[in-house]
Image (cartoon, helix red, strand yellow):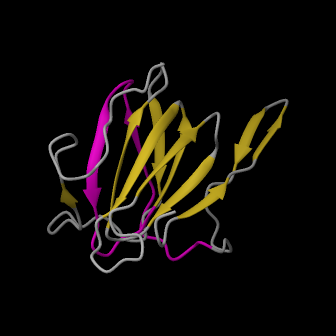
Amino acid sequence: MIDGVKIKKLKVIPDERGRLMEILRRDDDLFQKFGQVYMTTTYPGVVKAWHKHAKQADNIACVAGMIRMALYDGRPGSPTHKQVNEFYLGVHNPVLVQVPAGIYHGWTCVSQEEAVIVNIPTEAYDYGTPDEQRLDPHDNDIPYIWRRKDG
């Protein structure tokens, strides 16, 4: 596992009315601080990658559909420098992935329906000077290929 990355298994509580799933609580061991909450979606087969933050940690959960999330540690001096992690998140694997600052991350929707992702970053988005560095999803030095693995 990349140094600083944390996983929280999410508990789904169903009843005759529907279901409830707590994503992040302030009394969780991995909780750092609150910046904002936002929702984003990804269409089937679309890749949203790569980006990283200098200050912000992300707390990412997929609440509808499924995504394959990849992380890359490009931090010089890190004990896991150049390591890649891959996770499947969504209705079949309800987990939260905490991505520390400095880690490139992204995902592709692997379900047949649109994936709905909730992120709870530790910082509010700064429209004037965004804390974000982006790389092309396919043309970069990260040793990861986004295409589907058939077979």
Q: Is residue 14 left or right of residue 141?
A: right
**Relative to 41, does residue 23 appear above or below in the rendering?**
below
Q: Is residue 22 left or right of residue 78?
A: right
- Figure label count: 0
The picture places residue 81, in percent across and down from the top left corner, at: 34, 69
The picture places residue 68, in percent across and down from the top left corner, at: 46, 39
**Relative to 40, does residue 113 appear above or below in the rendering?**
above
Q: Is residue 65 left or right of residue 19?
A: left
Q: Which residues are magenta?
A: 30-58
| Residue sitting at the far right | 16
What residue appears at the point 25 percent right and 52 percent down from the top-left corner?
142
Q: Is residue 19 left or right of residue 92?
A: right
The picture places residue 52, in percent across and down from the top left corner, at: 28, 62
**Relative to 36, does residue 78 appear above or below in the rendering?**
below
Q: Is residue 36 magenta?
A: yes
What residue appears at the point 35 percent right and 68 percent down from the top-left corner?
124
What residue appears at the point 30 percent right and 41 percent down from the top-left corner?
48
The picture places residue 14, in percent across and down from the top left corner, at: 80, 37
| Residue sitting at the far front | 151
Q: Is residue 33 magenta?
A: yes
| Nearer to the camera, 130 or 105 | 105
| Nearer to the camera, 46 or 38 | 46
| Nearer to the camera, 9 or 138 | 138
